[in-house]
Image: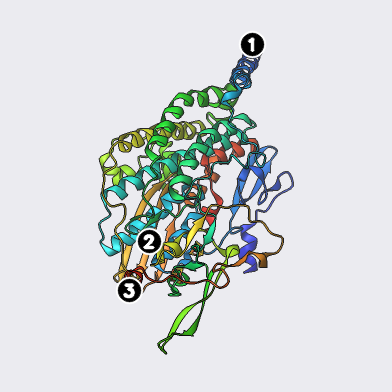
């Protein structure tokens, strides 16, 4: 055991030295611990250490019933809380073979896209913050606040809303929902040029991101990256397109793909994705079908014996929920394939040979959520 | 010569870009109506809190100090965190039979994640979410509430009233 740990700690020679970034470092946005071997300012080796925020969500889920464990997944990637819940509900519905009402499907999709917008806005703000620009954070929070207010009105909470339930959604949408969402889209479309003025067009920002943190297409596939990280390296991997769930089969939108594979490409992909999310919302908001928002599933949920898998596209990539049922009222085993865990693997190939100052830019462009890595 | 020129142009470009950003920020300084910052807690009276906001679980009582809870413990079973404890007692009915009624509805706000599953599970709509949010206390034992009021009892069923 001792030897095993030893081999994971980077050894240094005389002219190289080792520094630890984290687990309490502002640029890691959480308790990620990185050990770097530096030659001057150049990164020669890098090793992430995980486990500082491991809560055992997968194991805990085994002792909770099917209705109960869903709320725990909001605590994985908390910025995509709704999408995580949605994935769990979809996997349970797959097992039960229940049909979800059309209205619930559209509401879920709308909420998922709003979640994605809010998440990307926060990422945009914190990217600016990581690179020394403080103002973007406040601009990003202006629109994000509107989305959170919409969530608060309809779901009752702002972040971990537990709005999805097997069979539909918890409540019907708030009477003001449609009006507020339209107002949000209008305002965001008016304001998005400010995002370009503050960051995209800024030469300082560009020189810190262009050509930095290159990830080749082959590496991205080998490391099973997903989401904007993989799409910026030229891989088409949007689950919403490849394997549509809920209402994604009835909307048309573009999958944003860039081929440069650097930090700036990942930045641009996310910025364009926000515009596509708005397109999706605009297509759905006027056509929310009337009818039930929830099929009541009576009594205790028991899935037939078997294995079920569902993947969804969260704001950071592909989330897979793999569930094994032994026929009882609790899952026998749950495994989450979380996007951030796989994307973290790309950190090393991106930063080797680069400067230590670039590491912050690379981590910002990866958009890591540490509780999602550890679970 | 070329390198020096490039060097100074890049500095110049960066300064122009910074000024552009500053211009945008400054434009908000002269348009105070566009500023969205709220001054909490000064604005506590005008604070907008949506009606569905989940603050904590409460049990509504009517003017006769009656609630809807039948002590069926479905909410206790639905809660993933064990935040609810239903303590019931048996009382003697006038016709000689015994009936199980609610004695204490113990709620631990400290371990509640406001997931709404208890409210979803309750068949008699006996509990709802409150909009409050300023619940900080210095001792976590103060976060344990008893939701049914002293002396309260179960509301008579409507069908019996009509009869
Ligand atoms: S809201 Fe959730 S955690 Fe809180 S008491 Fe109800 S079921 Fe338990
Ligand atoms: S609050 Fe509702 S679910 Fe809980 S014991 Fe009372 S009646 Fe039953």
Q: Which residue is mark 3?
A: A327
Q: Which mark is residue A26?
A: none
Up/down of A260 relative to B79, above or below: above
Label 2–label 1 contact, CB within 8 A: no
Observer-nearest of A260 and B138: B138
Q: Which mark is residue A322?
A: 2
Residue A41 rendering spot, x and y as whole percentages: 68, 37
Q: CA distance from mark 2 to mark 1?
A: 59 Å
Cβ of disc 3 within 8 Å of ligand 1? no
Q: Quadrant of the N terminus of chain A?
A: bottom right
Whether disc 2's CB lies below 8 Å from ligand 1 is answered no
Q: Are marks 2 and 1 on the same chain?
A: no
Identify the residue position indicated by label 1 in the image: B5
| Mark 3 element type | loop
Judge by depth and name the residue closer to the eye, A180 or A275.
Answer: A180
Crowd around label 1: few <14 · some 14–19 · many ≥20 (10 Å): few
**Nearer-the-camera pick, A324 or B106:** B106
Q: Nearer the viewer, mark 2 or mark 1?
A: 2
Tag 3, which chain? A
> In screen coordinates, is A61 left or right of A19?
left
Q: Is mark 1 within 8 Å of ligand 1?
A: no
Mark 1 and mark 3 residues within 8 Å of each other at the beta carbon: no
Residue A346: percent from the left, percent from the top? 50, 45
Q: Tag 1, which secondary structure?
A: helix
Q: Earlier in the sequence, mark 3 or mark 2?
A: 2
Say whether mark 2 and mark 3 are on the same chain.
yes
């Amino acid at each position: 055991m001792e030897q095993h740990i030893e081999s994971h700690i980077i050894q240094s020679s005389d002219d190289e030295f080792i520094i630890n970034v984290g687990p309490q470092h502002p640029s890691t946005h959480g308790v990620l611990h990185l050990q770097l071997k530096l030659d001057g300012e150049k990164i020669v080796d890098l090793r992430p250490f995980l486990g500082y925020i491991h809560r055992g969500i997968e194991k805990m889920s085994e002792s909770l019933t099917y209705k109960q464990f869903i709320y725990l997944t909001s605590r994985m990637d908390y910025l995509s809380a709704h999408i995580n819940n949605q994935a769990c509900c979809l996997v349970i519905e797959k097992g039960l073979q229940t049909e979800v009402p059309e209205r619930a499907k559209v509401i879920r999709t709308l909420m998922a896209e709003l979640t994605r917008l809010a998440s990307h806005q926060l990422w945009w703000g914190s990217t600016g913050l990581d690179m020394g620009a403080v103002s973007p954070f406040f601009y990003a929070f202006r629109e994000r606040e509107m989305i959170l207010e919409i969530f608060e009105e309809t779901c009752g909470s702002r972040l971990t809303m537990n709005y999805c339930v097997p069979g539909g959604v918890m409540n019907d949408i708030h009477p003001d929902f449609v009006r507020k969402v339209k107002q949000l889209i209008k305002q965001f479309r008016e304001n998005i040029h400010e995002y370009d003025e503050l960051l995209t067009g800024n030469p300082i920002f560009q020189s810190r991101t262009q050509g930095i943190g290159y990830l080749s297409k082959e590496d991205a596939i080998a490391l099973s990256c997903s989401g904007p990280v993989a799409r910026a390296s030229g891989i088409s991997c949007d689950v919403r397109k490849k394997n549509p769930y809920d209402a994604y089969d009835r909307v048309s939108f573009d999958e944003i793909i860039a081929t440069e594979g650097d930090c700036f490409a990942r930045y641009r992909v996310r910025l364009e994705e926000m515009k596509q999310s708005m397109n999706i919302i605009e297509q759905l908001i006027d056509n929310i079908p009337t009818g039930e928002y929830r099929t009541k599933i009576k009594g205790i949920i028991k899935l037939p014996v078997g294995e079920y898998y569902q993947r969804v596209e969260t704001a950071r990539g592909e989330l897979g929920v793999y569930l094994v049922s032994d026929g009882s009222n609790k899952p026998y085993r749950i495994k989450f394939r979380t996007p951030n865990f796989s994307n973290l693997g790309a950190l090393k190939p991106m930063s080797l040979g680069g400067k230590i100052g670039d590491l912050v830019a690379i981590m910002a462009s990866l958009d890591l959520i540490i509780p999602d890595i550890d679970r | 010569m070329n390198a020096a020129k490039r060097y100074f142009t890049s500095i110049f470009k960066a300064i122009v870009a910074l000024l552009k950003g500053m211009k945008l920020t400054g434009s908000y300084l002269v348009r105070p109506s566009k500023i969205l910052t709220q001054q909490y807690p000064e604005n506590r009276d005008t604070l907008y809190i949506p009606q569905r906001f989940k603050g904590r679980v409460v049990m509504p009582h009517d003017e006769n100090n009656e609630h809807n809870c039948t002590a069926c413990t479905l909410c206790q079973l639905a809660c993933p965190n064990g935040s609810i404890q239903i303590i019931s007692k048996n009382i003697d009915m006038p016709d000689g039979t015994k009936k199980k009624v609610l004695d204490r509805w113990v709620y631990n706000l400290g371990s509640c994640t406001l997931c709404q599953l208890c409210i979803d599970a309750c068949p008699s709509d006996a509990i709802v979410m409150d909009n409050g949010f300023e619940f900080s206390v210095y001792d976590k034992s103060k976060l344990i509430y008893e939701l049914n009021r002293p002396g309260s009892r179960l509301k008579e069923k409507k069908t019996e009233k009509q009869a």
